Amino acid sequence: MTYQYWNERMETLPHAELETYQLEQLKKILAVAMRTPFYQKRLSEAGINSADEIRSLADIRRVPFTTKHDLRDGFPYGFLSVPKDEVIRLHASSGTTGTPTTIYFNKEDIVRWTNFVARSIYATGCNKTDVFQNMITYGLFTGGLGFHFGGEAVGMLVIPSGPGNTTRQFKLMQDFGTTVVHATPSFLLHVEAKMREEGVTRGSLALKRAFAGAEPYSEDTRRRIEDLLCIDVYNSYGLSEMNGPGVAFECQAKDGLHIWEDGYIAEIVNPDTLEPVPDGEVGELVLTCLCREASPILRYRTRDLTGFYTEPCSCGRTHRRLRRITGRTDDMLIINGVNLFPSQIEEVIMSIKEVGNNYLIVVEKEGVLDRLTVKIEVRPNIFMDDTRPLNALKERIRRTLQSMITINPRVELHESGSLPVSEGKAKRVQDNRPKDV
């Protein structure tokens, strides 16, 4: 196979030279980080008062870890390193307490991020002759605009269709000859099912490739999507704290995700001891962003569990590759590509006076999509024969939850004492989805 490169020199740079480049960029980003209120204090406490004190990549271990809680505590401007009038965009993700993690970009940051996404797209074999339908959420979520700008940089015709409404998605695909799509893996499976329902034939579509991300999925699921839709599916990895998409991506070899090491320093640590694990072993991914000035983030604990491949890739790229993300070190749920913490649900329902003290979150598969059900006990004086007040309460809870977590859940109301009570630590989540192997 002949592989194509967006920036051949940088993508195939000998790894020793790549590490030299990383060290130079690390010193620059440390100097930038020292302008932020958070890192001024955190680095000084760690005994780092100048970027020149970092003399090798191994010295990065002197830099303290950064967590999602740190980002929330620093909201809104604790991680801003440039004047606000230099900021041209922000993205944000929701949090367990309603406080988002907010990332800022200046003009150069957007250019650098776009370049990494374009490199990722180009590595899959796409070019300016492709028509790209972006079926992912736009707005504060980074996936929509990140891929949109990257696709335009490659020169593709970009259709910003957003998620949902499969009938309209099919019409756009047929009218404009879409060759590439970006969606969650569960939505891609849903697309195949809706094709059969609506009588859309594979011959009427020009699809060749799909970029799948935003939720973990197995190799079996990838193969099923490829077989059902007759396309190549490429794994994508990114997170808003590290810009969004374009952190790591599969090339045409489809043998692990190249993490673009000229933009990110990746470490794998034991999540309990926080010590490095040997190459090839699974641990928690820790990332330092080298390519964003407005919101520098150092040694960010992603909570994602993965490991490095140790052998080189057949494509010739020298940037190390990540294995599939096997899970997370915390209790986050991913429902149809949306990140959700049980504490977000608890925060909502416990603020409603009619709700009792016990609840259960149930996640199941309905077809290829996830279904979230929240079972809630109500106070003894609330459960009554007249269903109208109960239906009104149920609808109020559903609307409030949806506005908070952006997912439309089912809500079931139960009599006080009717839900199971755990001895010891309460079991609030019942995830009945089949486990990928």
Image (cartoon, rainbow, N blue to C red):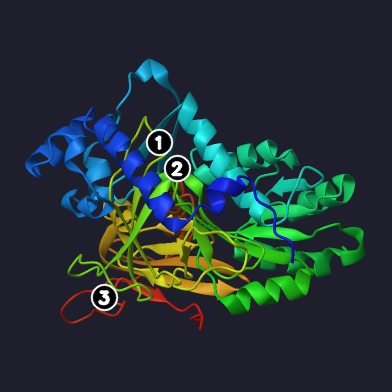
Marked residue nearer the N-terminal end (3 or 2) = 2
Question: Up-down: is 161 above or below 254?
Answer: above
Mark 1 in CB contact with mark 2 (< 8 angstroms): yes
Residue carrying label 1: 292
Left or right, residue 119 beside residue 274: right
* Local crowd size for mark 3, using a 10 Å CA cut-off: few (<14), some (14–19), many (≥20): some
Give the camera-side residue of 198 and 42: 42
**Circle 3: residue type:** Gly
Q: Tell which residue pokes out farthest to the right in this image.
A: 203
Q: Residue at x 73, y 63 (%)?
A: 191
Residue occupied by mark 2: 243
Q: Nearer the viewer, mark 1 or mark 3?
A: 1
Give percent across and percent down for residue 380: 26, 66
Please, what is the three-letter code of the amino acid marked with disc 1? Answer: Arg
Quarter of the picture holding the N terminus:
bottom right
**Lower sequence index among marks 1 and 2:** 2
Secondary structure category for the residue under label 2: loop
- Position of 205 with respect to 432 (left or right) is right
Residue that mark 3 sits on: 417
> Helix, strand, or loop for circle 1?
loop
In whole angstroms, how far apart are the C-alphas of marks 3 and 2? 46 Å
10 above or below 326?
above
Which mark is first along the chain, 3 or 1? 1
Residue 241 in percent (x, y) is at: 38, 45
Of circles 1 and 2, which is in front? 1
Measured in 3D between alpha carbons, the distance from the residue under mark 1 to the one under mark 2, in whole angstroms, is 8 Å
